[in-house]
């Protein structure tokens, strides 16, 4: 009998070496990820006017987020112009942003407040009409 390793023994030894190298690489990757992952802070937000493709304009609170593997801008719009009211959220990819202008919270709220006419409402008022005769 010969003491020479067979092809199967050589293949098994090569697989064992590859498994060891893979385990070392995984350990190294985990150390890098653990070193980089600290306490996560929420994305910074700011108030701005955003124009999309030059056709749509939003006033709101903006932040950069990651969705679907891509960085996106999140625009949060106070619907009634109130901080404690309902908010609408819209996401845009960076390529669709036409312009971005810094603003203040007061300016954003003022632009999102519904229009109220200063003129009295003219027209039919059912309370002033007498009951119809039947």
Image (spheres, rainbow, N blue to C red):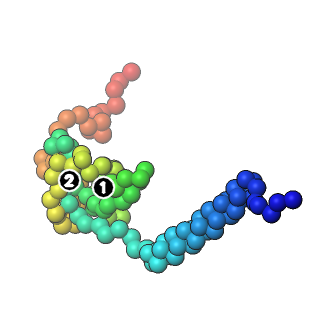
Nearer to me, 82 or 131: 82
Residue under the point 30% across and 39% down:
127
Nearer to me, 95 or 89: 95
Mark 1 crowdedness (10 Å alpha carbons): few <14, some 14-19, many ≥20: some
According to the picture, the residue beneath numbered tag 1 turns out to be: 73
Q: Could you tell me residue 71's position as x and y percent? A: 34, 56
Residue under the point 15% across and 59% down:
101
Distance between the alpha carbons at the discs numbered 1 and 2:
10 Å
Mark 2 crowdedness (10 Å alpha carbons): few <14, some 14-19, many ≥20: many
Checking the image for residue 20, the label placed there is: none
Residue under the point 76% across and 61% down:
4
Q: Could you tell me residue 43's position as x and y percent? A: 35, 68
The outermost residue toward the top is 134
Q: Quadrant of the C terminus?
A: top left
User: Is 30 on the left or on the right of 84, as rendered?
Assistant: right
Badge 2 element: strand
Can residue 89 be seen here? The reply is: no
According to the picture, the residue beneath numbered tag 2 turns out to be: 50
Q: Could you tell me residue 62's position as x and y percent? A: 28, 60
Nearer to me, 40 or 133: 40
User: Is 24 on the left or on the right of 5, as rendered?
Assistant: left
The answer to which image quadrant residue 86 occupies is bottom left
The disc, 1 or 2, on the residue closer to the chain's N-terminal end is 2
Q: Could you tell me residue 124's position as x and y percent? A: 23, 34
Residue under the point 30% across and 49% down:
93
Please say if the residues under marks 1 and 2 sit with CB atoms less than 8 Å apart.
yes
Q: Is residue 39 above or below residue 68?
A: below
The answer to which image quadrant residue 55 occupies is top left
Q: Is residue 75 above or below residue 28?
A: above
Badge 1 element: strand
């Amino acid at each position: 009998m010969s003491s020479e390793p067979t092809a199967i023994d050589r293949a098994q030894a090569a697989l064992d070496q590859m498994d060891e190298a893979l385990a070392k690489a995984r350990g190294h990757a985990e150390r890098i990820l653990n070193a980089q992952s600290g306490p996560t802070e929420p994305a910074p937000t700011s108030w701005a006017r955003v124009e999309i493709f030059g056709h749509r304009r939003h006033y709101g609170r903006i932040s950069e987020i990651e969705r679907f593997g891509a960085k996106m801008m999140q625009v949060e719009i106070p619907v009634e112009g109130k901080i404690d009211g309902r908010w609408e959220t819209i996401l845009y990819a960076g390529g669709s942003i036409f312009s971005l202008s810094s603003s203040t919270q007061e300016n954003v709220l003022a632009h999102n407040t519904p229009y109220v006419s200063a003129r009295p409402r003219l027209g039919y008022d059912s309370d002033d009409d007498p009951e119809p005769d039947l």
